[in-house]
Image (cartoon, grey):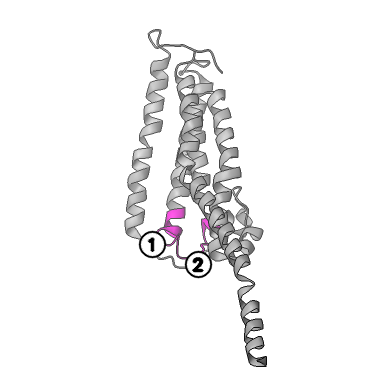
């Protein structure tokens, strides 16, 4: 009888944490779903804000003459931001290509900021804003940056924290999220490069180069009297 009572006590003790474990698992699962949705929808977030802003800029009365010095300086800034975009993307691909889901990357561009790919994307958006010469589109870029910082980047970093735990938390404490800290730069002497991923990124960047070329041509056409100027926005 004593043995039977002992077994019942042990059974009760072993079964007691199970609802808490299931509850914790449900919370983690819910967080994972939210993270997945926020990350997967990041393109929709950007498109929903920037495409209408770009259309408003294209069909607004131009504020600058394309042959003027300010417009030429903005075009030069647009190409500078585009080259920075290319540099960030290629540099990050050298270190993260094929290894993103397997290991926490903290070297090279990932030693100066936690999200170098997003730094590249920001440079691309600033390049577009420079070619469009539109404060309206620039404001849209700032809004998208806020949305990404609050929702998308946090969601992705939450996923990394679930995967890598304390290693990621330690990394995030010493490395800024977006603004590079160049004094923290460190890199291994040798880097294994996934040539297939690097080639794919090169193809993607060559397609991305079509946008600044197209924008510079379109902005010259936009100054013509036959171009539809439906709005008056800076």
Direction top: furthest residue:
225
Task: Say whether residue 129 is visible.
Answer: yes
The one of 165 and 196 positioned closer to us in this rendering: 165
Residue 201 lies within the magenta run: no
Dot label at residue 168: none
> Within the image, what quadrant is residue 213 found in?
top left
Task: Say whether residue 111 is visible.
Answer: no
Residue 99 lies within the magenta run: yes
> Within the image, what quadrant is residue 194 found in?
bottom left
User: Total marks drawn?
Assistant: 2
Q: Secondary structure at mark 2?
A: loop
Give percent across and percent down for residue 29.
53, 57
The one of 98 and 4 positioned closer to us in this rendering: 4
Residue drawn at (57%, 64%), measured in percent from left and top? 22
The one of 43 and 2 positioned closer to us in this rendering: 2
Q: Secondary structure at mark 1?
A: loop
> Which residue is disc 1 drawn over?
193
Q: Quadrant of the C terminus?
A: top right
Direction bottom: furthest residue:
2
Image: 75 above or below 232: below
> Which residue is disc 2 drawn over?
188
> Within the image, what quadrant is residue 157 found in?
bottom right
Image: 51 above or below 110: above
Residue drawn at (48%, 15%), measured in percent from left and top? 60
Main structural element of the magenta stretch: helix, strand or loop? loop
Q: Which residues are magenta?
A: 92-111
Give percent across and percent down for residue 47.
46, 33
Give percent across and percent down for residue 13.
65, 78
The one of 200 and 73 positioned closer to us in this rendering: 200
Residue drawn at (62%, 58%), measured in percent from left and top? 172
Foreground disc of the pair 2, 1: 1
């Amino acid at each position: 009888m004593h043995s039977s009572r002992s077994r019942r006590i042990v059974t009760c003790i072993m079964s007691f944490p199970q609802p808490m474990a299931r509850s914790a698992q449900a919370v983690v699962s819910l967080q994972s779903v939210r993270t997945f949705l926020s990350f997967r929808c990041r393109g929709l977030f950007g498109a929903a804000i920037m495409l209408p802003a770009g259309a408003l800029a294209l069909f607004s009365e131009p504020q600058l003459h394309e042959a003027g010095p300010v417009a030429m300086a903005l075009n030069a800034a647009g190409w500078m931001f585009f080259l920075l975009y290319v540099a960030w993307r290629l540099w990050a691909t050298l270190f993260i290509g094929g290894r993103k889901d397997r290991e926490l990357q903290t070297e090279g561009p990932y030693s100066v900021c936690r999200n170098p790919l997003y730094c590249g994307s920001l440079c691309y958006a600033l390049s577009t804003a420079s070619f469009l010469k539109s404060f309206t589109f620039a404001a849209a870029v700032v809004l998208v940056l806020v949305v990404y910082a609050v929702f998308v980047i946090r969601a992705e970093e939450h996923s990394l924290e679930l995967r890598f735990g304390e290693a990621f938390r330690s990394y995030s404490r010493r490395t800024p999220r977006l603004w590079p800290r160049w004094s923290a730069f460190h890199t291994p002497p040798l880097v294994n490069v996934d040539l297939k991923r690097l080639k794919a990124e090169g193809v993607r960047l060559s397609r991305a180069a079509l946008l600044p070329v197209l924008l510079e041509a379109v902005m010259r056409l936009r100054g013509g009297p036959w171009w539809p100027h439906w709005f008056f926005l800076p």
